[in-house]
């Protein structure tokens, strides 16, 4: 893999803001991943149930082998994805598993899972991780909004509330 300096601004944005917007067209495999995801959604959504304990909706796919989701593995293991993740983490990343989630719009009423989400804090502490979120369908006023908060604001919110780890105070 040849190092691409044009990806450095994405890594810098992740470090500074806690997230970065990926430029359109960066991942050649994205159209295939979207087509695969929409096929899985059509097949699995009718039988799926949302889990009110997780606030993430229905987990449609948690692939552990390439054959289960080739298009998702192809994008997750692309040179661009690995370079961005490695640059952000400061080490070679390990792919846990590509996942496909479906969240029913307003599944939990106003202020549901789309309003504010931080990954589970009860797991072992991971110093740095990289998560890539791709909307596999259009986000509009009926299925969104999709917002990201800068790192400094997210840290203030986590400090101000009891997020289940005892580090904040409930207000």
Image (cartoon, grey):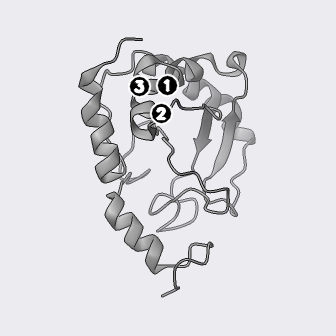
Instruction: Residue at 65%, 33% (x, y): give it.
Output: 97
Q: Find residue 124 and report its horizontal and vertical position in percent.
A: 67, 56
Q: Find residue 149 and report its horizontal and vertical position in percent.
A: 34, 59
Quarter of the figure with residue 85: top left
Other-residue count near label 1 (Cα within 10 Å), few / some / many at <14 / 14–19 / ≥20: some
Is 129 drawn above or below residue 124 in the view shown?
A: above
Q: Earlier in the sequence, mark 2 or mark 3?
A: 3
In the figure, is residue 152 to the left or right of 67? left
Q: Secondary structure at mark 2?
A: loop
Residue 21 shows in this picture: no
Circles 1 and 2, Cβ within 8 Å, touching? The answer is: yes
Q: Which residue is mark 2?
A: 136
**Extreme-top residue of the structure:** 1
Q: Which residue is mark 3?
A: 83
Q: Earlier in the sequence, mark 1 or mark 2?
A: 1
Q: Which mark is residue 77?
A: none
Quadrant where the N terminus lies? top left
Q: Which residue is mark 1?
A: 34
Count all numbered tags in the image, as a single digit.
3
How far apart marks 3 and 1 lie (CA) works out to 22 Å
Nearer mark to the viewer, of 3 and 1: 3
Nearer mark to the viewer, of 2 and 3: 3
In the figure, is residue 53 to the left or right of 147? right
How far apart marks 2 and 3 lie (CA) works out to 22 Å
Other-residue count near label 2 (Cα within 10 Å), few / some / many at <14 / 14–19 / ≥20: some
């Amino acid at each position: 893999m040849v190092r691409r300096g044009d990806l450095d601004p994405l890594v810098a944005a992740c470090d500074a803001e806690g997230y970065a917007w990926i430029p359109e067209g960066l991942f050649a495999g994205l159209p295939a991943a979207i087509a695969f995801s929409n096929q899985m959604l059509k097949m699995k959504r009718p039988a799926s149930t949302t889990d009110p304990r997780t606030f993430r909706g229905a987990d449609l796919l948690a692939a552990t082998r390439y054959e289960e989701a080739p298009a998702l593995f192809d994008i997750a293991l692309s040179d661009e994805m690995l370079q961005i993740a490695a640059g952000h983490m400061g080490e070679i990343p390990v792919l846990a598993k590509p996942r496909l989630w479906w969240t029913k719009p307003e599944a939990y009423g106003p202020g549901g899972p789309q309003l504010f989400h931080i990954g589970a804090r009860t797991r072992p502490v991971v110093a740095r991780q990289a998560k890539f979120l791709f909307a596999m369908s259009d986000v509009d006023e009926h299925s969104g909004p999709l917002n990201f908060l800068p790192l400094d604001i997210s840290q203030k919110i986590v400090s101000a509330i009891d997020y289940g780890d005892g580090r904040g105070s409930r207000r």
